[in-house]
Image (cartoon, grey):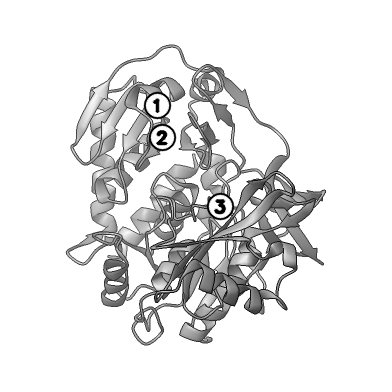
Protein backbone atom coordinates (compact mmCIF):
# COMPACT_ATOMS: atom_id res chain seq x y z
CA UNK A 1 0.00 0.00 0.00
CA UNK A 2 1.05 3.58 -0.69
CA UNK A 3 0.73 4.53 2.99
CA UNK A 4 3.55 2.05 3.79
CA UNK A 5 5.82 3.69 1.22
CA UNK A 6 5.07 7.08 2.77
CA UNK A 7 5.77 5.59 6.22
CA UNK A 8 9.19 4.43 4.96
CA UNK A 9 9.87 8.02 3.93
CA UNK A 10 9.03 9.17 7.46
CA UNK A 11 11.68 6.74 8.77
CA UNK A 12 14.29 8.28 6.46
CA UNK A 13 13.51 11.74 7.83
CA UNK A 14 13.71 10.38 11.38
CA UNK A 15 17.23 9.15 10.68
CA UNK A 16 18.13 12.67 9.55
CA UNK A 17 16.84 14.11 12.84
CA UNK A 18 14.22 16.31 11.14
CA UNK A 19 11.26 17.96 12.87
CA UNK A 20 7.80 16.89 11.69
CA UNK A 21 5.39 19.11 13.65
CA UNK A 22 6.15 22.40 15.33
CA UNK A 23 4.41 25.15 17.23
CA UNK A 24 5.64 28.02 19.36
CA UNK A 25 5.77 25.82 22.49
CA UNK A 26 7.32 22.57 21.20
CA UNK A 27 8.99 20.69 18.35
CA UNK A 28 7.97 17.12 17.50
CA UNK A 29 10.46 15.03 15.54
CA UNK A 30 9.78 12.44 12.88
CA UNK A 31 11.06 9.88 15.38
CA UNK A 32 8.33 10.89 17.84
CA UNK A 33 5.72 10.83 15.08
CA UNK A 34 6.68 7.28 14.11
CA UNK A 35 6.58 6.19 17.75
CA UNK A 36 3.04 7.58 18.08
CA UNK A 37 1.88 5.92 14.85
CA UNK A 38 3.19 2.56 16.08
CA UNK A 39 1.61 3.04 19.50
CA UNK A 40 -1.85 3.67 18.03
CA UNK A 41 -1.47 0.75 15.62
CA UNK A 42 -0.91 -1.45 18.67
CA UNK A 43 -3.87 0.02 20.56
CA UNK A 44 -6.23 -0.40 17.62
CA UNK A 45 -5.09 -3.93 16.77
CA UNK A 46 -5.25 -5.12 20.41
CA UNK A 47 -8.49 -3.45 21.52
CA UNK A 48 -10.46 -2.93 18.29
CA UNK A 49 -9.24 -5.42 15.68
CA UNK A 50 -12.69 -5.70 14.08
CA UNK A 51 -13.26 -1.93 13.83
CA UNK A 52 -12.85 -1.30 10.12
CA UNK A 53 -14.66 2.02 9.69
CA UNK A 54 -13.60 4.81 12.04
CA UNK A 55 -14.76 8.37 12.73
CA UNK A 56 -11.81 10.41 14.02
CA UNK A 57 -12.75 13.65 15.77
CA UNK A 58 -9.52 15.64 15.72
CA UNK A 59 -7.42 18.38 14.20
CA UNK A 60 -3.85 19.16 13.25
CA UNK A 61 -2.03 17.69 16.24
CA UNK A 62 0.34 14.80 16.89
CA UNK A 63 -2.33 12.46 18.25
CA UNK A 64 -4.86 12.98 15.43
CA UNK A 65 -2.25 12.73 12.69
CA UNK A 66 -0.81 9.56 14.24
CA UNK A 67 -4.22 7.88 14.57
CA UNK A 68 -5.09 8.76 10.97
CA UNK A 69 -1.81 7.31 9.69
CA UNK A 70 -2.11 4.20 11.89
CA UNK A 71 -5.68 3.52 10.74
CA UNK A 72 -4.71 3.70 7.06
CA UNK A 73 -1.71 1.39 7.61
CA UNK A 74 -4.02 -1.27 9.11
CA UNK A 75 -6.44 -1.38 6.15
CA UNK A 76 -9.15 0.65 7.84
CA UNK A 77 -11.45 3.28 6.40
CA UNK A 78 -11.32 6.52 8.38
CA UNK A 79 -13.25 9.78 8.29
CA UNK A 80 -11.52 12.73 9.99
CA UNK A 81 -13.91 15.30 11.46
CA UNK A 82 -12.88 18.74 12.72
CA UNK A 83 -16.27 20.37 13.06
CA UNK A 84 -19.72 19.55 11.76
CA UNK A 85 -23.33 20.40 12.47
CA UNK A 86 -24.17 16.70 12.12
CA UNK A 87 -24.88 14.62 15.20
CA UNK A 88 -22.75 11.60 16.08
CA UNK A 89 -25.49 9.11 15.13
CA UNK A 90 -25.94 10.76 11.73
CA UNK A 91 -22.25 10.31 11.01
CA UNK A 92 -22.31 6.70 12.24
CA UNK A 93 -25.21 5.87 9.93
CA UNK A 94 -23.64 7.77 7.06
CA UNK A 95 -20.46 5.68 6.93
CA UNK A 96 -21.52 2.56 8.90
CA UNK A 97 -18.92 3.37 11.55
CA UNK A 98 -17.65 0.73 13.98
CA UNK A 99 -15.57 3.05 16.13
CA UNK A 100 -15.52 6.71 17.12
CA UNK A 101 -12.25 8.16 18.41
CA UNK A 102 -12.26 11.52 20.16
CA UNK A 103 -8.64 12.55 19.84
CA UNK A 104 -8.59 15.45 22.32
CA UNK A 105 -10.32 13.50 25.11
CA UNK A 106 -8.70 10.18 24.03
CA UNK A 107 -12.10 8.54 24.21
CA UNK A 108 -13.14 5.46 22.20
CA UNK A 109 -16.78 4.56 21.44
CA UNK A 110 -17.06 1.07 19.95
CA UNK A 111 -20.28 -0.10 18.27
CA UNK A 112 -19.68 -2.95 15.78
CA UNK A 113 -21.63 -2.53 12.55
CA UNK A 114 -21.87 -5.52 10.22
CA UNK A 115 -24.20 -3.86 7.71
CA UNK A 116 -21.72 -2.07 5.50
CA UNK A 117 -22.72 -0.25 2.33
CA UNK A 118 -21.62 -2.07 -0.79
CA UNK A 119 -18.71 0.18 -1.85
CA UNK A 120 -17.30 0.11 1.70
CA UNK A 121 -17.68 -3.66 1.86
CA UNK A 122 -15.96 -4.11 -1.50
CA UNK A 123 -12.94 -2.12 -0.28
CA UNK A 124 -12.72 -3.99 3.02
CA UNK A 125 -12.98 -7.34 1.20
CA UNK A 126 -9.70 -6.60 -0.60
CA UNK A 127 -8.05 -5.08 2.51
CA UNK A 128 -7.93 -1.62 0.95
CA UNK A 129 -7.72 1.36 3.29
CA UNK A 130 -9.80 4.42 2.57
CA UNK A 131 -10.41 8.03 3.49
CA UNK A 132 -13.87 9.60 3.80
CA UNK A 133 -14.36 13.35 3.51
CA UNK A 134 -17.63 15.25 3.86
CA UNK A 135 -18.60 17.27 0.80
CA UNK A 136 -18.75 21.02 1.38
CA UNK A 137 -21.35 23.51 0.26
CA UNK A 138 -24.32 21.18 0.63
CA UNK A 139 -27.59 21.68 2.42
CA UNK A 140 -29.27 19.21 4.76
CA UNK A 141 -27.29 16.03 5.39
CA UNK A 142 -24.10 16.28 3.32
CA UNK A 143 -22.78 13.45 1.19
CA UNK A 144 -19.70 11.63 2.29
CA UNK A 145 -17.02 11.05 -0.34
CA UNK A 146 -15.15 7.73 -0.16
CA UNK A 147 -11.58 7.61 -1.49
CA UNK A 148 -9.23 4.71 -2.10
CA UNK A 149 -6.21 5.86 -0.06
CA UNK A 150 -3.73 4.35 -2.52
CA UNK A 151 -5.12 6.36 -5.42
CA UNK A 152 -5.53 9.56 -3.41
CA UNK A 153 -2.08 9.47 -1.78
CA UNK A 154 0.05 8.09 -4.63
CA UNK A 155 1.20 11.52 -5.79
CA UNK A 156 2.88 12.22 -2.43
CA UNK A 157 5.51 9.53 -3.05
CA UNK A 158 7.05 12.02 -5.45
CA UNK A 159 6.96 15.01 -3.07
CA UNK A 160 10.55 16.29 -3.04
CA UNK A 161 10.65 19.96 -2.06
CA UNK A 162 11.07 20.28 1.70
CA UNK A 163 9.37 23.34 3.20
CA UNK A 164 8.28 24.72 6.54
CA UNK A 165 4.53 25.06 5.97
CA UNK A 166 1.79 26.44 8.19
CA UNK A 167 -1.33 24.27 8.51
CA UNK A 168 -4.39 26.50 8.27
CA UNK A 169 -6.71 24.51 6.01
CA UNK A 170 -8.95 22.07 7.87
CA UNK A 171 -7.82 18.59 8.88
CA UNK A 172 -11.02 17.10 7.41
CA UNK A 173 -10.95 19.05 4.13
CA UNK A 174 -9.22 17.98 0.90
CA UNK A 175 -6.96 21.06 1.07
CA UNK A 176 -5.96 20.20 4.64
CA UNK A 177 -5.25 16.57 3.74
CA UNK A 178 -3.15 17.79 0.80
CA UNK A 179 -1.11 20.06 3.09
CA UNK A 180 -0.61 17.31 5.68
CA UNK A 181 0.63 14.61 3.33
CA UNK A 182 2.69 16.90 1.11
CA UNK A 183 4.60 18.34 4.06
CA UNK A 184 5.26 15.06 5.90
CA UNK A 185 5.98 13.03 2.76
CA UNK A 186 8.68 15.50 1.73
CA UNK A 187 10.36 15.77 5.14
CA UNK A 188 9.11 19.27 5.79
CA UNK A 189 7.86 20.77 9.04
CA UNK A 190 4.13 21.30 9.60
CA UNK A 191 3.61 24.45 11.68
CA UNK A 192 0.48 24.45 13.82
CA UNK A 193 -0.64 27.80 15.30
CA UNK A 194 -2.02 27.74 18.85
CA UNK A 195 -5.12 29.52 17.59
CA UNK A 196 -6.30 30.76 14.21
CA UNK A 197 -6.57 34.47 14.94
CA UNK A 198 -4.80 36.72 12.44
CA UNK A 199 -2.42 37.95 15.16
CA UNK A 200 -1.45 34.43 16.21
CA UNK A 201 -1.06 33.23 12.62
CA UNK A 202 1.30 36.08 11.74
CA UNK A 203 3.27 35.81 14.99
CA UNK A 204 3.70 32.07 14.47
CA UNK A 205 4.76 32.53 10.85
CA UNK A 206 7.36 35.11 11.85
CA UNK A 207 8.82 33.25 14.83
CA UNK A 208 8.98 29.81 13.19
CA UNK A 209 10.17 31.08 9.80
CA UNK A 210 7.32 29.73 7.72
CA UNK A 211 8.17 29.30 4.04
CA UNK A 212 4.81 28.21 2.58
CA UNK A 213 1.37 29.63 3.33
CA UNK A 214 -1.58 27.60 1.98
CA UNK A 215 -4.71 29.76 2.17
CA UNK A 216 -7.98 30.70 0.51
CA UNK A 217 -8.50 34.16 -1.03
CA UNK A 218 -10.95 34.96 1.78
CA UNK A 219 -8.32 34.19 4.41
CA UNK A 220 -5.73 36.23 2.48
CA UNK A 221 -8.11 39.21 2.55
CA UNK A 222 -8.15 39.04 6.36
CA UNK A 223 -4.36 38.72 6.53
CA UNK A 224 -4.01 41.80 4.31
CA UNK A 225 -5.90 43.81 6.91
CA UNK A 226 -2.81 43.50 9.15
CA UNK A 227 0.15 45.68 8.14
CA UNK A 228 2.58 42.95 9.27
CA UNK A 229 1.54 40.74 6.36
CA UNK A 230 4.52 41.73 4.21
CA UNK A 231 8.02 40.61 3.25
CA UNK A 232 9.69 42.65 6.01
CA UNK A 233 7.83 40.90 8.84
CA UNK A 234 7.81 37.54 7.03
CA UNK A 235 11.22 37.40 5.30
CA UNK A 236 11.23 33.58 5.19
CA UNK A 237 7.96 33.33 3.22
CA UNK A 238 8.64 31.92 -0.26
CA UNK A 239 5.33 30.59 -1.54
CA UNK A 240 1.64 31.38 -1.12
CA UNK A 241 -0.57 28.61 -2.46
CA UNK A 242 -4.15 29.69 -3.07
CA UNK A 243 -7.03 27.24 -3.13
CA UNK A 244 -10.73 26.72 -2.22
CA UNK A 245 -11.67 29.82 -4.24
CA UNK A 246 -10.27 31.58 -7.30
CA UNK A 247 -7.82 34.46 -6.97
CA UNK A 248 -9.04 37.76 -8.42
CA UNK A 249 -7.18 40.68 -10.01
CA UNK A 250 -7.35 42.89 -6.95
CA UNK A 251 -5.99 40.24 -4.60
CA UNK A 252 -3.20 39.44 -7.03
CA UNK A 253 -2.21 43.13 -7.21
CA UNK A 254 -2.30 43.63 -3.44
CA UNK A 255 -0.11 40.59 -2.82
CA UNK A 256 2.43 41.88 -5.34
CA UNK A 257 2.45 45.25 -3.57
CA UNK A 258 3.11 43.62 -0.19
CA UNK A 259 5.68 41.02 -1.29
CA UNK A 260 7.00 42.22 -4.65
CA UNK A 261 8.79 39.42 -6.45
CA UNK A 262 9.94 37.76 -3.22
CA UNK A 263 6.96 35.38 -2.93
CA UNK A 264 5.69 32.99 -5.59
CA UNK A 265 1.90 32.83 -5.98
CA UNK A 266 0.56 29.40 -6.89
CA UNK A 267 -3.10 28.77 -7.72
CA UNK A 268 -4.01 25.23 -6.69
CA UNK A 269 -7.04 23.26 -7.78
CA UNK A 270 -8.80 20.71 -5.64
CA UNK A 271 -12.24 19.21 -5.19
CA UNK A 272 -13.33 16.76 -2.52
CA UNK A 273 -14.43 14.24 -5.15
CA UNK A 274 -11.25 14.23 -7.28
CA UNK A 275 -8.47 15.19 -4.90
CA UNK A 276 -5.84 17.80 -5.76
CA UNK A 277 -4.49 17.21 -9.29
CA UNK A 278 -0.99 18.53 -9.96
CA UNK A 279 -1.12 21.90 -11.73
CA UNK A 280 1.23 24.55 -13.07
CA UNK A 281 0.54 28.25 -12.47
CA UNK A 282 1.18 30.76 -15.24
CA UNK A 283 4.21 32.90 -14.38
CA UNK A 284 2.79 36.29 -15.28
CA UNK A 285 -0.79 35.64 -14.16
CA UNK A 286 -1.58 33.23 -11.28
CA UNK A 287 -5.27 33.27 -12.20
CA UNK A 288 -4.43 30.76 -14.96
CA UNK A 289 -3.45 27.12 -14.40
CA UNK A 290 -2.81 24.06 -16.51
CA UNK A 291 -2.87 20.44 -15.48
CA UNK A 292 0.42 18.58 -15.64
CA UNK A 293 0.40 16.51 -18.79
CA UNK A 294 -0.35 12.80 -18.63
CA UNK A 295 -1.62 12.84 -15.05
CA UNK A 296 -5.33 13.51 -15.64
CA UNK A 297 -7.79 13.99 -18.49
CA UNK A 298 -10.02 17.00 -18.75
CA UNK A 299 -12.55 18.45 -21.17
CA UNK A 300 -14.61 21.61 -21.45
CA UNK A 301 -18.30 21.28 -22.26
CA UNK A 302 -20.40 24.45 -22.51
CA UNK A 303 -17.59 26.30 -20.68
CA UNK A 304 -17.80 23.89 -17.73
CA UNK A 305 -14.75 21.88 -16.64
CA UNK A 306 -14.98 18.07 -16.48
CA UNK A 307 -12.14 15.98 -15.02
CA UNK A 308 -11.25 12.30 -15.19
CA UNK A 309 -8.56 11.51 -12.66
CA UNK A 310 -6.97 8.35 -11.23
CA UNK A 311 -7.39 9.94 -7.78
CA UNK A 312 -11.16 10.36 -8.16
CA UNK A 313 -13.46 9.08 -5.45
CA UNK A 314 -14.74 5.53 -5.20
CA UNK A 315 -18.21 6.98 -4.72
CA UNK A 316 -20.70 8.82 -2.53
CA UNK A 317 -22.14 7.58 0.74
CA UNK A 318 -25.55 8.65 1.99
CA UNK A 319 -27.51 7.34 4.99
CA UNK A 320 -29.47 4.84 2.86
CA UNK A 321 -27.17 3.91 0.02
CA UNK A 322 -23.81 4.15 -1.70
CA UNK A 323 -23.34 5.48 -5.22
CA UNK A 324 -20.24 4.22 -7.05
CA UNK A 325 -18.42 6.63 -9.35
CA UNK A 326 -16.42 5.90 -12.48
CA UNK A 327 -15.82 8.41 -15.24
CA UNK A 328 -15.95 12.13 -15.83
CA UNK A 329 -16.64 14.41 -12.89
CA UNK A 330 -18.55 17.63 -13.52
CA UNK A 331 -16.69 20.19 -11.39
CA UNK A 332 -19.46 22.79 -11.84
CA UNK A 333 -16.68 25.32 -12.51
CA UNK A 334 -17.18 27.75 -15.39
CA UNK A 335 -13.85 28.35 -17.12
CA UNK A 336 -12.17 30.47 -19.75
CA UNK A 337 -9.52 28.97 -22.03
CA UNK A 338 -6.37 30.65 -23.30
CA UNK A 339 -4.49 28.00 -25.31
CA UNK A 340 -3.46 25.34 -22.81
CA UNK A 341 -4.21 27.60 -19.84
CA UNK A 342 -7.46 27.51 -17.84
CA UNK A 343 -8.94 30.38 -15.85
CA UNK A 344 -11.58 29.44 -13.27
CA UNK A 345 -14.39 32.01 -13.44
CA UNK A 346 -16.60 30.63 -10.69
CA UNK A 347 -19.04 27.91 -9.70
CA UNK A 348 -22.17 27.55 -11.81
CA UNK A 349 -24.21 27.80 -8.60
CA UNK A 350 -22.63 31.20 -7.81
CA UNK A 351 -23.38 32.78 -11.18
CA UNK A 352 -25.95 35.58 -11.02
CA UNK A 353 -28.39 35.64 -13.95
CA UNK A 354 -29.44 39.24 -14.58
CA UNK A 355 -32.02 39.28 -17.36
CA UNK A 356 -30.19 36.46 -19.17
CA UNK A 357 -26.72 37.99 -18.65
CA UNK A 358 -24.16 36.09 -16.54
CA UNK A 359 -22.42 37.85 -13.68
CA UNK A 360 -19.50 36.24 -11.83
CA UNK A 361 -19.36 37.47 -8.20
CA UNK A 362 -15.55 37.27 -8.07
CA UNK A 363 -15.23 39.70 -11.00
CA UNK A 364 -17.43 42.30 -9.30
CA UNK A 365 -15.72 41.76 -5.94
CA UNK A 366 -12.33 42.35 -7.53
CA UNK A 367 -13.41 45.77 -8.82
CA UNK A 368 -15.13 46.87 -5.61
CA UNK A 369 -12.19 45.78 -3.47
CA UNK A 370 -9.94 48.14 -5.41
CA UNK A 371 -12.00 51.14 -4.22
CA UNK A 372 -10.72 53.41 -1.46
CA UNK A 373 -12.09 52.67 2.01
CA UNK A 374 -13.16 49.11 1.09
CA UNK A 375 -11.82 46.28 3.26
CA UNK A 376 -13.81 43.37 1.91
CA UNK A 377 -16.84 42.58 -0.26
CA UNK A 378 -19.24 39.68 -0.79
CA UNK A 379 -21.31 39.78 -3.98
CA UNK A 380 -24.39 37.62 -4.49
CA UNK A 381 -27.67 37.45 -6.41
CA UNK A 382 -30.97 38.77 -5.08
CA UNK A 383 -34.28 37.60 -6.58
CA UNK A 384 -36.08 40.16 -8.74
CA UNK A 385 -39.49 39.77 -10.38
CA UNK A 386 -38.50 41.62 -13.53
CA UNK A 387 -34.83 40.66 -14.08
CA UNK A 388 -34.84 37.25 -12.40
CA UNK A 389 -31.94 38.37 -10.22
CA UNK A 390 -30.04 41.56 -9.51
CA UNK A 391 -26.52 41.99 -8.16
CA UNK A 392 -26.24 42.69 -4.42
CA UNK A 393 -23.17 43.39 -2.30
CA UNK A 394 -22.25 43.29 1.36
CA UNK A 395 -19.42 45.76 1.92
CA UNK A 396 -17.09 46.13 4.87
CA UNK A 397 -15.57 49.62 5.09
CA UNK A 398 -12.51 50.99 6.84
CA UNK A 399 -14.24 54.21 7.95
CA UNK A 400 -17.86 55.29 8.26
CA UNK A 401 -19.84 55.89 5.10
CA UNK A 402 -23.58 55.49 4.52
CA UNK A 403 -24.87 52.96 2.02
CA UNK A 404 -26.25 55.84 -0.07
CA UNK A 405 -22.88 57.64 -0.12
CA UNK A 406 -21.00 54.49 -0.97
CA UNK A 407 -23.49 53.48 -3.66
CA UNK A 408 -23.09 56.84 -5.41
CA UNK A 409 -19.29 56.61 -5.25
CA UNK A 410 -19.37 52.96 -6.36
CA UNK A 411 -21.44 53.71 -9.48
CA UNK A 412 -19.04 56.44 -10.53
CA UNK A 413 -16.02 54.21 -9.89
CA UNK A 414 -17.46 51.21 -11.74
CA UNK A 415 -18.91 52.92 -14.80
CA UNK A 416 -15.82 52.33 -16.96
CA UNK A 417 -14.83 49.05 -15.29
CA UNK A 418 -18.04 46.99 -15.25
CA UNK A 419 -21.03 46.71 -17.54
CA UNK A 420 -24.09 48.39 -16.04
CA UNK A 421 -25.92 45.14 -15.22
CA UNK A 422 -22.89 43.95 -13.19
CA UNK A 423 -22.84 46.98 -10.88
CA UNK A 424 -24.63 46.12 -7.60
CA UNK A 425 -28.07 47.68 -7.30
CA UNK A 426 -28.38 46.61 -3.67
CA UNK A 427 -25.66 47.53 -1.17
CA UNK A 428 -25.48 46.67 2.52
CA UNK A 429 -22.74 48.07 4.75
CA UNK A 430 -21.64 45.38 7.22
CA UNK A 431 -19.16 45.14 10.08
CA UNK A 432 -17.47 42.13 8.51
CA UNK A 433 -17.73 39.80 5.54
CA UNK A 434 -18.13 36.33 6.98
CA UNK A 435 -16.09 33.32 5.93
CA UNK A 436 -16.97 29.70 6.64
CA UNK A 437 -14.93 27.31 8.78
CA UNK A 438 -13.41 26.16 5.48
CA UNK A 439 -12.21 29.72 4.76
CA UNK A 440 -14.68 30.30 1.94
CA UNK A 441 -16.56 33.56 1.60
CA UNK A 442 -20.18 33.34 2.77
CA UNK A 443 -22.32 35.07 0.14
CA UNK A 444 -25.95 36.03 0.49
Q: Is residue 5 left or right of residue 314?
A: left
Marks 2/1 in contact by CB < 8 Å: the verdict is yes
Q: What residue is shown at x 33% (from left), y 35% (from top)?
A: 56
Residue that label 2 marks: 79
Q: Nearer the viewer, mark 2 or mark 1?
A: 1
Given residues 35 and 165, the one toward you in this image is 165
Q: Which badge, 2 or 1, comes first in the chain's sequence?
A: 2
Residue sitting at x 52%, y 31% = 143
- Label 1 SS: helix
Residue 160 visible to an observer of this rendering = no
Residue 60: image location, x then y, percent: 32, 51
**Which residue position is annotated with label 1?**
91
Disc 3 and disc 2 in contact, CB within 8 angstroms:
no
Quadrant position of residue 415: bottom right
Kindly report the distance in space between the C-alpha atoms of the residues bearing marks 2 and 1: 9 Å
Q: Residues within 10 Å of mark 2 (few under 14, many from 20)?
A: many
Q: Is residue 261 above or below residue 281?
A: below
The mark lying in front, picked from 1 and 3, is 1
Q: Is residue 108 left or right of residue 326?
A: left
Q: Is residue 189 above or below residue 177?
A: below
Left or right, 106 with respect to 48, comes to: left
For marks 3 and 2, the one nearer the N-term is 2
Amino acid sequence: MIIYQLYDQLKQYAELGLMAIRNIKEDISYTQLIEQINMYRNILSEKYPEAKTIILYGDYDLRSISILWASLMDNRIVMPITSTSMQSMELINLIDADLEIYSKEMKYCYHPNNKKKIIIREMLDINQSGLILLSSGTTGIPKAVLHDSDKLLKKYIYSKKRYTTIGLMLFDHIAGIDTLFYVLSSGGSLIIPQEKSIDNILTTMSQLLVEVLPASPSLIQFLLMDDRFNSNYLPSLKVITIGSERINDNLNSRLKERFGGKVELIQKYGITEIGTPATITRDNDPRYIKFKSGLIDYKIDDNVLYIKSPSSMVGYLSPDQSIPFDGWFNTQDQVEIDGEWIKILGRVSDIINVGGQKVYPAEVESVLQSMDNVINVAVYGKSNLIMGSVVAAKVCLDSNETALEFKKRMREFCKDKLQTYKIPSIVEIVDEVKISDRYKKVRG
